[in-house]
Amino acid sequence: MDAAETPDGPEAAAHDGGRPAWQHRLLAGGVEPDPRFTLANERTFLAWVRTALALLAGGVA
């Protein structure tokens, strides 16, 4: 069975030492992420926390 015939498709094909393609894309080292993306992710997380707290406060009141 070749990469095109795998149950998960070509995405699950082994690359670089047997790691699946998605791991290679996610875990490829050596490049620092742009700080704007990190800060945007943090803002999004904090917005979800703020929303959850508001819903909890509204449910208690």
Image: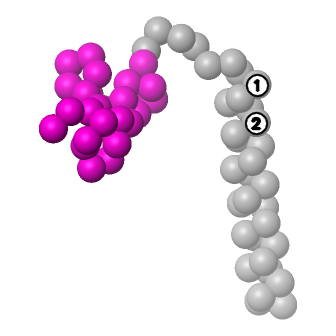
In the foreground, 40 or 18: 18
Amino acid type assigned to the residue bearing label 2 in the image: Ala
Question: Given contact means CB atoms under 8 Å apart, are the residues at marks 2 and 1 in contact?
Answer: yes
* Position of residue 6 in the picture relative to residue 33 (left or right): left
In the foreground, 14 or 35: 14
Q: Which residue occupies 69% across, 39% down?
A: 41
Which residue lies under the disc numbered 2?
Answer: 40
Q: Which residue occupies 78% across, 77% down?
A: 55
The range drawn in magenta is 1-28
Q: Is residue 18 above or below residue 60?
A: above
Q: Is residue 51 above or below residue 60?
A: above
Which residue lies under the disc numbered 1?
Answer: 36
* Magenta stretch encompasses residue 12: yes
* Position of residue 19 in the picture relative to residue 48 (left or right): left
Amino acid type assigned to the residue bearing label 1 in the image: Arg
Image quarter (top left, top right, bottom left or bottom right) of the N terminus: top left
Image quarter (top left, top right, bottom left or bottom right) of the C terminus: bottom right
User: Does the image show residue 46?
Assistant: yes
Q: Is residue 45 above or below residue 13?
A: below
CA separation in Å, label 2 and label 1: 6 Å
